[in-house]
Amino acid sequence: MFFNSLMALFSNDMGMDLGTANTLVYVKGQGIILFEPSVVAIRKGANNKVLAVGNRAKEMLGRTPGNIVAIRPLKDGVIADFEVTEQLLRSFITKVHHRRAWVHPRLVIAVPSGVTEVEKRAVVDSAERAGASEVYLVEEPMAAAIGSGIQISEPAGHMIVDIGGGTTEVAMISLAGVVLSQTVRIGGDEMDEAIIQHLKKTYNLLVGERTAEEIKIRVGSAFPLEDELKIEAKGRDLVSGLPKTITVSSEEVREALAEPVNTVVEAVRDTLERTPPELASDLVDRGIFLTGGGALLRGMDRLLASATDIPIHVTEDPLTTVVMGTGKILDEMSTLREVLINSQYA
C-alpha cells in the first residue's frame, strides 16, 4: 500500500469511460488522450498471450486465424471476462503513461447505474490488478451530467439519456444525486445486430460487425430524413457462398433499427412516468440531455422529442461527455466527491 501511494505521486490521475464498445481516458492536466475500442486480441494457448489491444485488435475482428481470437471483454456495460479486462486496463494505463510499467495512478471509472455490487467489485478488482493505486466509481449518467456542464447541485430536475454500445441509461438527477434511473441493455451493439439480421433475412447476405456498424453510421436513422440515403453493403451470399454486393437504403435500415430504437424510447417514457411531478415540470423548460454514441444516430433527438413533447438537447460531443465528467471529478475532487459511489470501494 505504501509503495502504491509513493508511485501514485509520480503518476497522473486518470478518468475512464470503460465502455462496451470504446474506452476513453482523461488524464488530469492533459485532457482526453486515449479513445480506442474495448477489444483485445489473444493467441490461444497455455498463456493466452495478448497480441494487440484497442485499434489494432479491432482491425482483427472477423479476420483472425483459428489460434487468434479478438475479444470484447465487456458486455452490456459490465465485465464479461475478468482476466481480459485486466489486460485491457493494464495496456491502456501503461500506454497513457508512455509505457512506464511502474505507474500507479488514481482512477475514476464511470459504470452503468444498474450494475450490481458484484459487478462494481469486478471493475475495482480489475483496475487495482492492472496497477491503479486507488479506484473510484461514478454512475455514468452522473458523469454525463457533469461532463455536459449541468449544475448538478441545484434542487432541480435534469434528465440524462446516455445511449452507449451495450446499455442505455436514463436517469433523473437532482441535488447531486440520482433520484431514479433505468438501465436497458440495448445500445449500439444491438442496433448493429439488428442490421446484420435484416440483411440476412432480406438478402441472404451475411455481413460482419464492422460492416453493420459502418452502415449504421453512414445511413442509419431513427426518424424520416428529408433526403434519404443509400449505401453499398458487401458480404457473403448465404446461398452461393460467394462474395456479394447489394444497395441498402436508409429507409430499410431505419425499419431494421425500429425495435432497439423503440426500446430506448419506451425506457425514456417509463422513467418520465415514474418521475415526481415537481421534477418532471423542470424538464418542460430544461429539456432532456441526450449523449453517448447513440445520440449521433440521425433523428434520434427528433424521435424522442415527438414521443415525449419535451425539448431534446444533444450534448456538444456525445462520445466524450462521460469521460469529460470523470475528468471534472478529478479536477474538483474536493467538491464533487459526493457523487462517487465509493470513497474507495471496500
Image (cartoon, grey):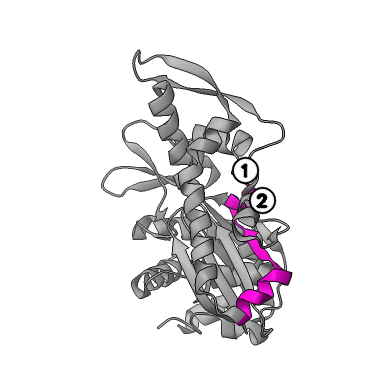
**Residue indicated by mark 1:** 223
The amino acid type, in three-letter code, at marker 2 is Arg
Residue 142 placement: quadrant? bottom right
Residue 217 rendering spot, x and y as whole percentages: 60, 39
In the image, residue 315 lies in the stretch drawn in magenta: no
Residue 268 rendering spot, x and y as whole percentages: 53, 62
Residue 330 placement: quadrant? bottom right
Q: Which residues are magenta?
A: 278-296
Image quarter where the C terminus lies is: bottom left
Instruction: Specify few, some or many for label 1: CA neighbours under 10 Å numbering under 14, 14-19, or 20 or more.
Output: some
Q: Is residue 300 visible?
A: yes
Residue 183 rendering spot, x and y as whole percentages: 46, 64
Mark 1 or mark 2: name the one nearer the start of the chain.
1
Secondary-structure class at tag 2? helix
Secondary-structure class at tag 1? loop
Cβ atoms at labels 1 and 2 below 8 Å apart: yes
Residue 270 relative to residue 307: left or right? left
Q: Residue at x 43, y 32 (%)?
A: 198
Q: Nearer the viewer, residue 10 or 259?
A: 259
Residue 145 rendering spot, x and y as whole percentages: 64, 70
**Residue indicated by mark 2:** 302
Prevalent SS, magenta region: helix
